[in-house]
Image (cartoon, grey):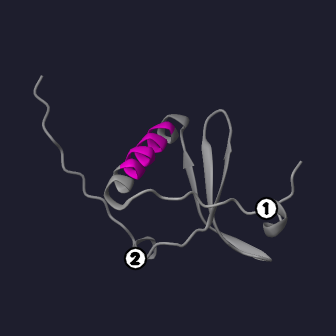
Amino acid sequence: MNQQQQNLNVKIEDSVLKGSYANNMQVSFSGEEFILDFMNLFPPQGIVVSRIFLSPGHVKRMAAVLANTMKKYEEQFGAVREASAPATSEIGFKTQ
């Protein structure tokens, strides 16, 4: 079978192009989707800067791509030390 490569033009609005800083992420899910809330927390307050909805299949693919990309990064620049998680009391989350 002969498959032709297609070009895909992707537009990016200026407001998205400048990006958003996030120093925390919260993940929730249902049977149909994952919800990723990227936040900028500076106690005693914070703001959700982006909310992304993904299918479970896309989350699995994204996790694999991120793991592979981190491996390549560390091969080039050295090991990355995992950031410690803040204590929930530091950022005001309530546990159930």
Identity of the residue drawn at 44% across and 38% down: 61
Q: Measured from the top left, where is residue 16 in percent x and y?
A: 44, 70
Q: Are marks 2 and 1 in contact (CB under 8 Å)?
A: no
Which residue is more in the foreground, 78 or 58? 78
Q: Measured from the top left, where is residue 48 in percent x and y?
A: 66, 67
Q: How many labels does the image show?
A: 2
Answer left or right for 57 relative to 90.
Answer: left
Mark 2 or mark 1: whose residue is earlier in sequence: 2
| Vertical comparison of 15 with 32: above or below | below
Amino acid type assigned to the residue bearing label 2 in the image: Asp
Answer left or right for 16 relative to 94.
Answer: left
Q: Measured from the top left, where is residue 75 in percent x and y?
A: 34, 52
Label 2: which secondary element: helix
Badge 1, how many Cα within 10 Å: few under 14, some, many 20+? few
Q: Distance between the residues labelled 2 and 1?
A: 35 Å
Name the chief secondary structure element in magenta. Answer: helix
Instruction: Name the residue furthest right.
Output: 96
Answer left or right for 69 relative to 43.
Answer: left
**Which labelled disc corresponds to residue 87?**
1
Amino acid type assigned to the residue bearing label 1 in the image: Ala
| Vertical comparison of 35 with 17: above or below | above
**Which labelled disc corresponds to residue 14?**
2
Residues in magenta? 60-71
Identity of the residue drawn at 44% across and 48% down: 66
Label 1: which secondary element: loop
- Residue 61 among magenta residues: yes
- Residue 64 among magenta residues: yes
Instruction: Name the residue furthest left.
Output: 2
**Which labelled disc corresponds to residue 7?**
none
Answer left or right for 8 relative to 29.
Answer: left
| Vertical comparison of 7 with 5: above or below | below
